[in-house]
Image: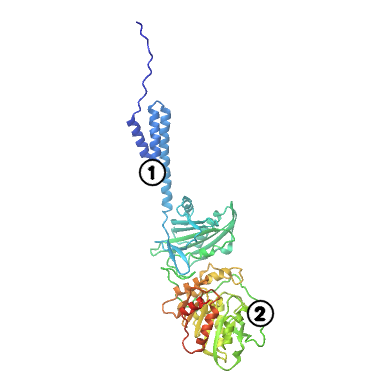
Amino acid sequence: MDHETFAHEPPPARIPVVGVAITALVTGALGAVAGASAGAMVAVLGGVIGAALGTAGAVAFTTGRRWLGGGVIALGLVSNVCCATGGVVYQGVRSIVPDVVALEPIATADHAYLRHPTLGFLVGAPTEDFEDGSSSPAVRVMAISLRPAGMPEGVWAWTSRETGAMILVAALRASAEPTEASATAFIHAFLRGAITADRTLDPTFVSWSDEDHDVWARAAGSNAYGPVAMSARYRAWRDDAGQWHALFVAMKTHPDDDAMPYLLEVHTPNEPWRGPGAPPPGFAPRTTSLAAARASFTSTPLRGPRNPVPLAPLPDDDAFEVSRYESPVGSLAAYLTRNARERERRPAVLWLHGGYAMDDGDLDPEWGPRALAEAGFVVMLPATRGEHGSDGQIEMFLGEVDDVRAALEHLRALPAVDPERVVVMGHSVGGTLATLLAESGAPARAYFAFGPCADAHWMNAWGPDDQGWVYDPRRVEESWVRSPIAFLAGITSPTFVVEGANESQALAARAIAAAAPPGAPIQVIVPSGGDHQSLVRPVVDLLIPRLRSSEPITLSAAEVEAIAAAP
């Protein structure tokens, strides 16, 4: 019998499981090791990718697809090299930009700050609409651009989704003491590089202080999204070990927005506190008298606003008339009650008006001066320099203190005035001047300041005519010598600060209370209600019989609380 001959196909190739497993293990291990330098997640990802490519390559190789298998295994090795390269780059960046250290929130009576736990610097806490982006890779990359100014010790960033504004804070370790040339060159280069078109630098916002190693700058222009401005401040300090550090703060805003208030809230360790506001823990206020601070300081005003409108004449039968008094700047106008001509001595009140000029409201029947005049007091309302056509210009709480002191001396010298029963009262701007006058040591039976500011910076930001800065706010001494919160230790006469809780100036009153030294004869009263205007006349009415008396003048928080609660 014939036998058929059959063609047999070769049996299928067996996959060497052990070999594939070893290849996967080796490539996976190499991927994990390569990626480990960039962090645990990258190590896991590198291991998974290496193992997967090693397995696929080994299977392809052992099943006869040697070119494909070799290529896949080579791809796995290339991925390992990429992981290793990325890890090296990552570690390089980490060596330049350290991990983010959380800044500690610090609050005072009127400000919120963030403080570095070891370096000790302070920056203002961004408002609630800012989101923290300090951990983003973009911030780390941005930090590398700061390397010319020193080794980064930390970089933080916040962005506002609402306005698009951005805040960047960087702490740097300087290799040598910064100079004006090095600091200015760095800050200018950063600002110019941050704006891509129409780059300009405003020379009026560039300054340097050798004492504080402090430089400010501002650039304005446009980028792909429209107009933009960058404002920045660079401030250096030396620690106890002699190492120089620098704090760089930049803020991106629309050109119409002012970054100055935020940049003023930059403070470095060991600096004497000069505001804004009350000193936080760890910062001591500069201890000097108002007279000493002003004697060693020369102001550099940016402009000199004036109010040329003279005081309005009053009818002959009015209790007040227009008068004049002499101050260091020249002859100044005032409203003075006609009973000042009499010979019978009586108590008197120097009333310091609100705002930067007087109007009909200052002699309104429902306001304090008219009530005091009707009660028989000699009342004087002085204009200060630059007001109502007077000599000089408005200086915002600087020369005006000399003017109101001259007015007080003029009032005490009048024949109808008992100099031992003269009280000073002021509202708003006048309340600020009343507090400063008390700190100057001018003799008065008592001082009453309704709604004063604590720090002159915020008043300067508005200006007396809503036209902006009167003096350069970057010179912190300009604000400090004008700020009541700085010289509370100089108060020797009983002083009362009153402001309603329903008013932003309540923060200023609380800041004054927090900054007052122990034992100072100052009482701050902020009831649970009331506003900037509503408490003034009722408190004056309450005080009138006490001002007539020879007993010490008192005013309690419970009494003012009852006034605020009254319908």
Tell which residue pokes out farthest to the bottom in this image: 343
Task: Tell me if residue 162 can be seen.
Answer: yes
**Residue 9 percent coordinates (x, y):** 38, 18
Q: Nearer the viewer, residue 509 or 188?
A: 509
Residue appearing at x 66%, y 81% in the figure = 312
Q: Residues within 10 Å of mark 2 (few under 14, many from 20)?
A: some
Q: Nearer the viewer, residue 523 or 562?
A: 562
Earlier in the chain: of badge 2 and badge 1, it is 1
Q: Which residue is mark 1?
A: 43
- In the rendered view, does 85 fall on the left or right side of 371? left
**Tag 1: amino acid:** Ala
**Tag 2: amino acid:** Pro
Colour mapping: rainbow
Q: CA distance from mark 2 to mark 1?
A: 80 Å
Residue appearing at x 39%, y 36% in the figure = 52
Quarter of the image containing the N terminus? top left
Figure check: 552 above or below 194 = below
Q: Which mark is residue 310?
A: 2
Task: Tell me if residue 327 can be seen.
Answer: no
